[in-house]
Image: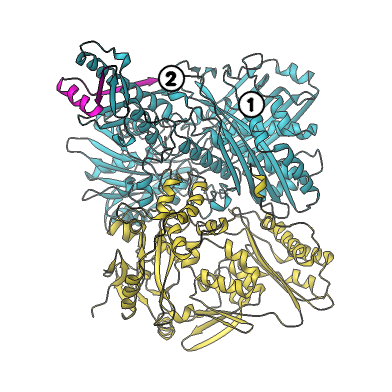
Amino acid sequence: MSERPIQFYFRGAIQSVQGPAPTRTVLQYLREDLQQTGTKEGCAEGDCGACTVVIGELVGEPGAEELRLRAVNACIQFLPSLDGKALFTVEDLAAGEQLHPVQQALVDRHGSQCGFCTPGFAMSLFALYENQDHCPERDEIDHTLSGNLCRCTGYRPIVDAARDAYALPRRRLDRLPVIAALKTLADLPPLDYLGDGRRSHSPRTLAELAELREQLPNAGMVAGGTDVGLWVTKQGRDLGELILTGAVAELKRIQIGPGRLEIGAGATLTDAFAALTAFEPQWAELARRFASTPVKNAGTLGGNVANGSPIGDSMPALIALGARIVLQRGATTREMALEDFYLDYQKTALAPGEFVRALVLDAPAAGLQRHFRSYKVAKRLDQDISAVACGLAVHVDDEGCIRRARLAFGGMAATPKRAAAAEAALLGRPWDAAAVRRAMDALGSDFAPFTDVRASSAYRLSVAANLLQRFWLETSGAADAPVRLAALAPIAPEDQP
Amino acid sequence: MSASLIGRPLPHESARLHVSGKAHYVDDLPQATGTLHAAPGLSTIARGRIRSMDLSAVRAYPGVRAVLTAADIPGDNNCGPILHDDPILADGEIRFYGQPVFVVAAETRDIARQAARLAKIDYETEPPILDMDAAIAAESWVLPPFSMQRGAVDAAFADAPHRLSGSAVLGGQEHFYLEGQISCAQPGDDGTLHVLCSTQHPTEMQQMVAHCLGWRAHRVSVECRRMGGAFGGKESQSAQWACLAALLAVNTGKPVKLRLDRDDDMVATGKRHPYRYQWESAFDDSGRLLGLKLEFAADCGHSADLSGPVNDRTICHVDNAYYLDALALKSLRCKTNRVSNTAFRGFGGPQGMFVIENVIDDIARHLGRDPLDIRRANFYDVEPGARSSTPYGMTVEDNVAPALVAELERDCAYAARRAAIADFNAGSPVLKRGIALTPVKFGISFNATHYNQAGALVHVYTDGSVLVSHGGTEMGQGLYTKVRQIVAHEFGLPFADVRLSSTDTRRVANTSATAASSGTDLNGKAAQAACANIKARLAAFVGELTNGTVAAADVQFADGRVQAPGFDEAFADLVMRAYRARIQLWDAGFYKTPKIHFDPVTKLGRPFFYFAYGAACSEVAIDTLTGESRVLRVDILHDAGRSINPALDIGQIEGGFVQGMGWLTSEELWWRPDGKLMSHAPSTYKIPTASDLPEVFNIRLYDNANVEDSIHRSKAVGEPPFMLALSVYQALRDAVAAALPPGQPLRLDAPATPEAILRALAGGES
């Protein structure tokens, strides 16, 4: 049987790569196989952005397809994940000697010093420039650049360049040939090949995925690859046979019904968080601070949840909102409360042959007022793993009495976990200072957190308690001054000389 | 007449290449056929001995071509730049967790890395010394403790109206150059080796490689066109990897490239030295220091590396901008079972200035005064006088700190904002704001006098184009751009007519590291000297052509022409004529910094040609529930002398400041109890990102021509701005103080992570 190659749009044409090792990264392919060295390796773990490339995908219904361009980290993207997509690198930006506006603005603003991170910045800015017609605000720029580290400039000239690019004559990618090529690729059979002794499957439908998963319960599952990629680049692990879920369109579906939100496990974090923020506006801060833009563009909500890391940021907030996880094996699905999915450190309720299909959230019950917040505490504002993350929800009745409480924490135990004693301390009480105090004290019996590189046990415990205090201050109206830094009024322009 | 290129804000000479991905770093260069790739095997204990080592599985792994251990090193097994105490590969003894034990060369980098994981090493472990307290208790030093005293310290303390004691701890810092360590060693056909290396110090790499091979220097050449960042981390510590690549290349006869994985790089290469301090201060009612007793300890790691000069620079910067009358200093250079710490922007200076700013802040809080008042009360005299001598015996002759601070204080509305912050804090129980304005005075020149020399080679080709080589390396700071400006200015040529070649030990010999902020000062002057030689010959030639009617002194080089009264010719035409007349159109230039001397034993002398000054005012906010902080606004006024390129200089100021801010806030090194560094990747070690850039960030250059005859009266600007970030840390202290009862002693560990701030708010120590 002759197996089809990986095919994708690159440098103006459809390229074919026959049978590479399934875990060969896009970055290795670019640098080592093609000698296209503009894209750099800074960390090989998706945390520095020197390898940033832009991926193009068709989205939308047949007949009305659009090209969606998003920045991702090439260093942890496996080559088969490119199949059916378009790849753009820094070498694609300039038209001959004419630099792209984001490049020209970087030059004009002195946005490069050593220059090693610069191609990655250029690509992140290119994605922003293509996706947004209006000149970005500072926070949009920061978010765009949240996955790009620069050690030389201090970022000011790069932030300025992001704006200045919009003042230069507008240049747009000619999308039509890309869309035409991607349509052609969409008609190919699913990618399924043997490379370097390892088989890689990229099913297209949910049914195919379910069947494969049942047949191959021990195969590695790769969704966005933002975690699995590091198993290869950092630990040298042999992942064996792989099932890549990225081509299963049904798994990416986000369904918004009355009072209900269902997010397919394969939806990217970017898409999932947009839906979650629309569903519950208090998601906004978590959506902003979770990982980086390139990681959110590749990683999936299902992957974050399925990995079951004690420090996964989405789970505490999902648990606080009462999210349920939908698991599928063959044609059978089952649902459970998300907190029940986590059994122990990196151990979940996932049965052999089963996979995460979706997450479901319901609107709060009528008759109760729900207060909800999600907080994240880390050493750095952007792209940092939490010392403590939490999702906090209390439901208060007309009498002001707490009827339900879901206080879920990450970074405090071997799994994302609810604080049962603290919740119990709140139930039946008015949402007041005394109740919060009791809950704060009770946290000590809920958790015995670990000490690691991110924080000490003692810090985690005191901050978890203090976040309950913040939650109360923010939702009870007890505070008459801002209680978190994000709420500080910006420095007024008249303060500037 | 067109404007001079000196003082023009030209873009970095490689900017277009950077943004289009066309700038070649070592890993991007076309690779010779048969190139092998190397990976090191690192130790998994912090201290002990290798009982036995089974590398058979490594050797047997398909694609592996060579595996070397210490026994395979034909020459010196040492990469220590000053002392011979730093093995390239562990020779029986393990000194830190992550020490290179063996090295593999294979057909691909993946194979080399996979194979390296298969080693079976049996260790006999010993209890490691993992912190400075343990090292001090064990009297474990890389270099002996050093003490110095000036003035009648005991008398000053006995008579002083006020005395305070204090202590502080200060963390280290990972360089996090975006391009990791890399060397590619290419054997030549005649028993030579050419090493492409990302290094700040090609000459030292040449020497180290030659020594480890047992060769003489002229068989080894080292070349570097540009680095993807360095910050001191590629001064001495590029040597280990250059040597390993060289050993493998000679062993296999093939080109060998060694590019470290990021995690290996962070584990196996040295960082900024962590420090801890204890002090007693004596002062009067105005807050003026009468006496200071200071003991500081530096965690040097397992070997000396550059720790001697780093600690010496700390000694030379504990004064910062302040006159210290009676002073007793003790410097402990701790040897621990950690990676050997090394040069990093500021080179011990930041650690000196950190402590004096804390001493002063404590005094201010004790007296209930604005810390800026106490800073001002302690400045050196403006005109050399009774309060102008530094602890190391140099007279401060160029002091602009008082004037510069006053200008910044006014421009940033310090007083009004301090009042507004007090109002805000009174009404804000959870969030607290703080502000601080701190000065910087930084000595320019290598403390070791002999490093203050440079060479350059300037070629004028017969078409009038110019190629320059010098000993300085380009790591992003813009050295090549500034030297192009300097040379183009000398010949009166457009910028495009001058090119820089890569830095190569074959073109300029016996170079110093590009370090100590000295790159432009030294290499700019050397290039200028080379130009002067060529210009003198051309001027004399013009004299000949005009039959002696034109004096050489009247010949001008400007606008691409050579002009004198009655003479006017295009530069290119004149050089072609000069060539035909057999006039030498290329020359070398040499420069040595005048006036400087320093006794490395007594630590006295005039180590610095001049001082660079600056000041920053930072405003911050903290969250007293979590310890999180934000920098809200920063105003900087910095003295770059008469700037050769204001755009590049402002880039150094901003970048240095933000890097310093990271050092003092989010960048925390954390080791497991067994000595393994756990903050060994960007996922766990957090340098600032774009969102950490202060919302308001005003940078201005201070108009101040260098009083010394530096290159075009500019001042070095690579390191000094780093220490402007001390204002952020001091502002955080101010914010913490606002949440504490008045007068309560304040101890804030650095980096001021959320955890450190919460601990300070609880009044606790680490």
Residue drawn at (59%, 48%) of the image: B666
Is A159 in front, or is B463? B463
Above or below: residue A218 compared with residue B405: below
- How far across and how far down the image is residue B310, in percent? 52, 30
Q: Quadrant of residue A225?
A: bottom left
Q: Which mark is residue B593?
A: 2
**Label 1 with label 2: CB-CB less than 8 Å:** no
Is B268 in front, or is B466? B466
Q: Which residue is mark 1?
A: B403
**Residue A376 visible here:** yes
Q: Which mark is residue A138?
A: none
Outermost residue to the front: B566
Q: Amino acid at mark 1?
A: Ala
Q: What stretch of residues is rendered in magenta?
A: B565-593
Task: Please tell me how crowded label 2 is: few (under 14), some (14-19), or many (20+) other residues with Cα within 10 Å.
Answer: many
Q: Amino acid at mark 2?
A: Thr
- Tag 2 subunit: B
- How far across and how far down the image is residue B542, in percent? 23, 17
Quadrant position of the N terminus of chain B in the picture: top left
Task: Please tell me how crowded label 1 is: few (under 14), some (14-19), or many (20+) other residues with Cα within 10 Å.
Answer: few
B745 displayed left or right of B461: right
Is A409 in front, or is B465? B465
Say which colour chain A has.
yellow
Asked if the stretch drawn in magenta spans residue B568, the answer is yes
- How far across and how far down the image is residue A131, in percent? 46, 65
